[in-house]
Image (cartoon, grey):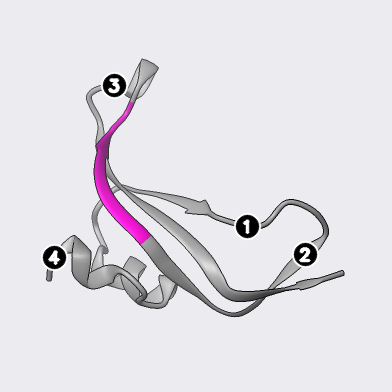
Amino acid sequence: MTLEDLVLMPETQARKALAGKSLRLRVLAPLGPFAGRGVMRVLRCRPSTGSGVNSEKEFIELVCGYESYVSL
């Protein structure tokens, strides 16, 4: 499985597929009072290296978002 295969996969399945690897999870959300609705999916997946104290540590960054958002 490649990292491109993870795009649009539910976040929980992507984390299971990457078990044992260092991950950074970021959630993309609109500004303001909104609640995520539906399944959280992987929008972008890329290998990265840390910065600062962890500059030598490699990890995979997952940028995720919900299928839709509702205003609160």
Would residue 48 be found to the left or right of residue 30 on screen? left
Query: Residue 53: where, in percent of width, then height?
Result: 37, 17
Could you tell me the amino acid type at mark 1?
Ala
Whether 61 is drawn above or below 39: the answer is above
Query: Residue 10: where, in percent of width, then height?
Result: 41, 77
Whether tag 1 and tag 4 are in contact, CB under 8 A, the answer is no
Query: Residue 30: where, in percent of width, then height?
Result: 67, 56
- Residue annotated with mark 3: 55
Whether tag 3 and tag 2 are in contact, CB under 8 A, the answer is no
Distance from label 3 to label 1 (Cα)?
27 Å
Distance from label 3 to label 4 (Cα)?
24 Å
Of callouts 3 and 1, which one flags the residue occurring earlier in the amino acid sequence?
1
- Residue annotated with mark 2: 34
Distance from label 2 to label 4 (Cα)?
32 Å
Whether 36 is drawn above or below 47: the answer is below
- Residue annotated with mark 4: 2
Front position in the image: 17 or 66: 66
Write down the region rendered in magenta: 44-50
Q: Main secondary structure of the magenta part?
A: strand
Whether 54 is drawn above or below 25: the answer is above
Q: Report crowding for label 3: few under 14, some 14 to 19, many 20 or more residues within 10 A (C-alpha).
A: few
Quadrant, the C terminus: bottom right
Could you tell me the amino acid type at mark 4?
Thr
- Residue annotated with mark 1: 29
Where disc 2 sits, the SS reads: strand
Could you tell me the amino acid type at mark 3?
Ser
Where disc 3 sits, the SS reads: loop
Whether tag 1 and tag 2 are in contact, CB under 8 A, the answer is yes
